[in-house]
Image (cartoon, coloured by chain):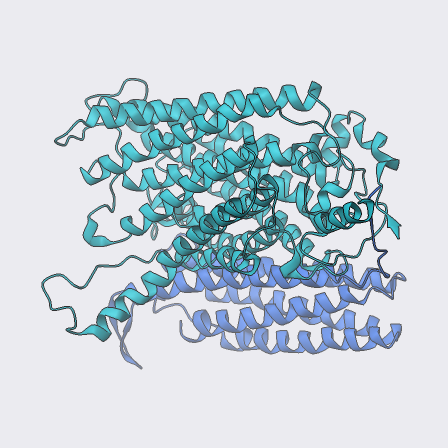
Chain colours: A cyan, B blue
């Protein structure tokens, strides 16, 4: 028998790292912490801008804080920070830190690629944000800064591809002996699926941006100059691209639920399929498929073949991801029903986030039907908020759950639980009123000069309150996490009674994670080991 | 203390090869997306009268002539690069450093030939970058291909130095280098047909 006690090097990783060590480190836990920490900062920045934008929409007659020239830029900056400055780094960061531990690997595959990806992403994001501040970005007035914005987004996307490649390669090549792909923990599986979809989708964004950069810098003949940037590359800040970023969050839920339910995941193969089929969104991302329902004014069976031909691509690309999310929800419910759930913060965050993602994905199905008349309305912003905030909420739950493996300490459950409830309320307030306003034809890109019958001030006030509540929730979570992870209660190696290999090493793990390679005989090796040990003891 | 069964010796992980495969997939969607946009713009272009072919799409300006010898040689050159890169794999597997070194050298040489032909094509076509939609998109897509080609040359140099420097057991880098050139050849074939043949 091989011991998997790994405390021998725990002292070295507990020492406070110098700045140089942080910058040059290729330790996956360090890179993951950098990604997650920067993601939380980006989230705060994006939420501040989102509150500002929502506040401007309350009074549709005249601007209060912004001016007409900066509207497009502030809208873009808010989306950029929330999508590429918060959701992407949070999810990738947790994947970088946790996936090798789940796989029983001593390090991430190609760790310098992941570390380089982080710095490249940060540089690109910094350039893009700086360019917007200096009057660049979509609709910006400074030509050079618009160029810099496009260049920054290219660099940023390149960095994310590098890190995603490292994560995907880890899952494909660094699993412990005996751990087939279908035995890999659900978060690792979803990290693989999510990384591969990013590797396939982000280059299309980069290619489009290269065209935009060359055209804007030299000719402005093909893509509409600075205004055209949103038209051509804006899909990366909207649905269904946001689904791709949410895929690892689904795996987080499916890892958290069985542990909190004190049982094994129900229908594990179905869970693999459910996460996998969400990945068809990568095709929807690059094709932007919409549909016009062909039943109006005709008999149901007239031209049925043509009707099916119209509906099939839309159904495959838009409805199938919804089935995947529904599957994850159903399997989570079934697992909890089979077990003895304990109400802990990770579970509350995970389930609330999953419900709001489901709301967003379902709303996007409706929004992609041309006949609903929601195209160009603020309904899209409502679906974006539901999916983005839902993903962030799950990431909060993941930080509560895997925090011990990242920092060696844990966030107290009693303090974190109310934040899970607030996050749900904030997401509901931030998204549903926008969806209702979308049915009243409130335009998406305008903060001023619109009107419609109905309580338009009410919907926009509720949304502003939702964004402000999410900002407060995030601030409280960051403060709680900072306090807990620096001076909080020390976590044991296995504080949640986990089932997978990350809980078999110390908290935080040593530099090389595990002292020995281990053989895995099931999808829940640690749970099996515990039951065997208990059986012998009895 | 919890204990799991001991593991056998860790199998070869081929991380560089897998990562190169993923990079090739990323490169495929990069160039695929750019070619799709190129074709979309070409399809949306108005019609004009051509002396040789009747009514054609007014996409590439009539006065621009593609130096077909150079562009065809790029395609042929890339096919030769693939053979050379595979020869390097063949030799390295047989621990034949002399032939592996020769194969790496020829891979780089033919790769440089392709880069040179691309620069020649740019100078001969005389496309002004600020001339219009075709012009900017032409430089964007061929420039991207050039970046991918140069990264292939860097990859070959790294693989050659590692192998010839004594890391003769790490064959996956040599194999990954060959895979990357296969990808470049496939990608350039698509670009060659759409940009230089179909125009």
Between A474 and B113, the residue placed more toward the observer is A474
- Side of A30 where A66 appears, left or right: left
* Residue furthest out toward the left: A297
- Side of B63 where A192 appears, left or right: right
Image location of residue A526, percent across then percent down: 73, 48
Q: Is residue B195 above or below residue A125?
A: below
Quadrant containing the C terminus of chain A in the rendered view: top right
Q: Quadrant of residue A53?
A: top left
Residue A222 shows in this picture: yes
Between B135 and A506, the residue placed more toward the observer is A506
Between A135 and B48, the residue placed more toward the observer is A135
Residue at the location (50% across, 67% down)? B124
Residue A478 shows in this picture: no
Q: How many numbered marks does the figure carry?
A: 0
Residue at the location (16% across, 72% down)? A301
Residue at the location (44% across, 69% down)? B195
Between A455 and A334, the residue placed more toward the observer is A334
- Side of A431 where A518 appears, left or right: right
Q: Is residue A390 above or below residue A418?
A: below
Q: Quadrant of residue B177?
A: bottom right
Residue at the location (71% across, 59% down)? A179
Image location of residue A413, percent across then percent down: 59, 25
- Side of A47 where A91 appears, left or right: right
Image location of residue A184, percent across then percent down: 65, 55
Image location of residue A113, percent across then percent down: 69, 48
């Amino acid at each position: 028998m091989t011991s998997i006690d790994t405390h021998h090097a725990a002292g070295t990783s507990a020492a406070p790292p110098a700045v140089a060590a942080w910058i040059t480190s290729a330790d996956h836990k360090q890179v993951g912490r950098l990604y997650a920490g920067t993601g939380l900062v980006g989230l705060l920045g994006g939420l501040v801008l989102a509150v500002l934008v929502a506040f401007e929409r309350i009074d549709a007659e005249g601007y209060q804080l912004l001016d007409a020239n900066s509207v497009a830029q502030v809208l873009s900056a808010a989306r950029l920070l929330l999508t590429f400055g918060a959701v992407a780094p949070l999810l990738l960061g947790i994947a970088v830190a946790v996936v090798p531990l789940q796989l029983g690997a001593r390090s991430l595959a190609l760790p310098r690629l992941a570390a380089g990806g982080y710095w490249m992403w940060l540089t690109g994001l910094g350039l893009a944000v700086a360019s917007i501040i200096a009057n660049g970005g979509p609709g910006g007035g400074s030509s050079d800064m618009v160029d810099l914005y496009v260049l920054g987004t290219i660099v940023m996307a390149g960095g994310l591809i590098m890190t995603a490649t490292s994560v995907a390669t880890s899952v494909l090549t660094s699993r412990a002996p005996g751990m087939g792909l279908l035995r890999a923990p659900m978060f690792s599986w979803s990290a693989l699926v999510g990384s591969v979809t990013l590797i396939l989708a982000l280059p299309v964004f980069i290619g489009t941006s290269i065209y935009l950069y060359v055209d804007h810098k030299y000719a402005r003949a093909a893509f509409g100059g600075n205004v055209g940037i949103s038209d051509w590359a804006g899909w990366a800040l909207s649905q269904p691209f946001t689904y791709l970023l949410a895929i690892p969050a689904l795996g987080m839920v499916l890892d958290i639920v069985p542990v909190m339910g004190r049982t094994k995941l129900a229908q594990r193969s179905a869970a693999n399929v459910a996460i996998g089929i969400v990945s068809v969104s990568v095709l929807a991302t690059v094709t932007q498929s919409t549909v016009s329902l062909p039943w109006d004014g005709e008999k149901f069976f007239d031209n049925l073949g043509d009707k099916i031909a119209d509906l099939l691509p839309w159904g495959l690309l838009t409805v199938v991801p919804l089935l995947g999310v529904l599957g994850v929800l159903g399997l989570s419910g079934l697992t909890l029903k089979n077990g003895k759930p304990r109400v802990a913060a990770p579970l509350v965050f995970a389930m609330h986030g999953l419900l709001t993602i489901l709301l967003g994905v379902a709303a996007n199905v409706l929004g992609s039907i041309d006949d609903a008349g929601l195209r160009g309305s603020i309904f899209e912003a409502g679906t974006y908020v539901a999916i983005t905030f839902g993903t962030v909420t799950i990431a909060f739950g993941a930080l509560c759950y895997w925090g011990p493996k990242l920092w060696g300490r844990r966030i107290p459950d009693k303090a974190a639980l109310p934040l899970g409830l607030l996050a749900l309320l904030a997401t509901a307030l931030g998204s549903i009123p926008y969806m209702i306003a979308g049915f009243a034809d409130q335009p998406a890109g305008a903060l001023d000069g619109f009107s419609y019958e109905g309580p338009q001030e009410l919907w926009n006030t509720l949304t502003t309150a939702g964004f402000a509540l999410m900002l407060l929730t995030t601030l409280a979570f960051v403060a709680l996490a900072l306090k807990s992870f620096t001076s909080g209660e020390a976590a044991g190696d296995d504080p949640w009674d986990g089932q997978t290999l990350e809980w078999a090493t110390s908290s935080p793990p040593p530099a090389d994670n595990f002292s020995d390679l281990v053989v895995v005989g099931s999808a829940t090796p640690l749970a099996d080991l515990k039951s065997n040990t208990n059986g012998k003891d009895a | 203390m919890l204990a799991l069964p001991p593991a056998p010796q860790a199998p070869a992980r081929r991380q560089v090869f897998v990562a190169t495969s993923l990079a090739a997939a990323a490169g495929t969607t990069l160039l695929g997306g750019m070619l799709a946009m190129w074709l979309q713009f070409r399809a949306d272009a108005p019609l004009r009268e051509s002396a040789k072919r009747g009514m054609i799409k007014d996409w590439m300006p009539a006065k621009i002539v593609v130096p077909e010898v150079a562009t065809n040689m790029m395609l042929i050159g890339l096919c030769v690069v693939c053979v050379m890169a595979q020869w390097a794999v063949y030799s390295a597997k047989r621990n034949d450093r002399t032939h592996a070194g020769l194969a790496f050298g020829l891979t780089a040489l033919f790769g440089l030939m392709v880069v040179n032909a691309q620069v020649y094509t740019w100078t001969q076509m005389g496309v002004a970058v600020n001339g219009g939609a075709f012009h900017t998109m032409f430089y964007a897509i061929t420039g991207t291909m050039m970046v991918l080609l140069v990264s292939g040359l860097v990859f070959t140099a790294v693989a050659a130095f590692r192998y010839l420097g004594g890391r003769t057991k790490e064959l996956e880098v040599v194999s990954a280098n060959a895979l990357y050139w296969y990808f470049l050849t496939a990608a350039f074939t698509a670009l060659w047909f759409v940009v230089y043949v179909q125009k």
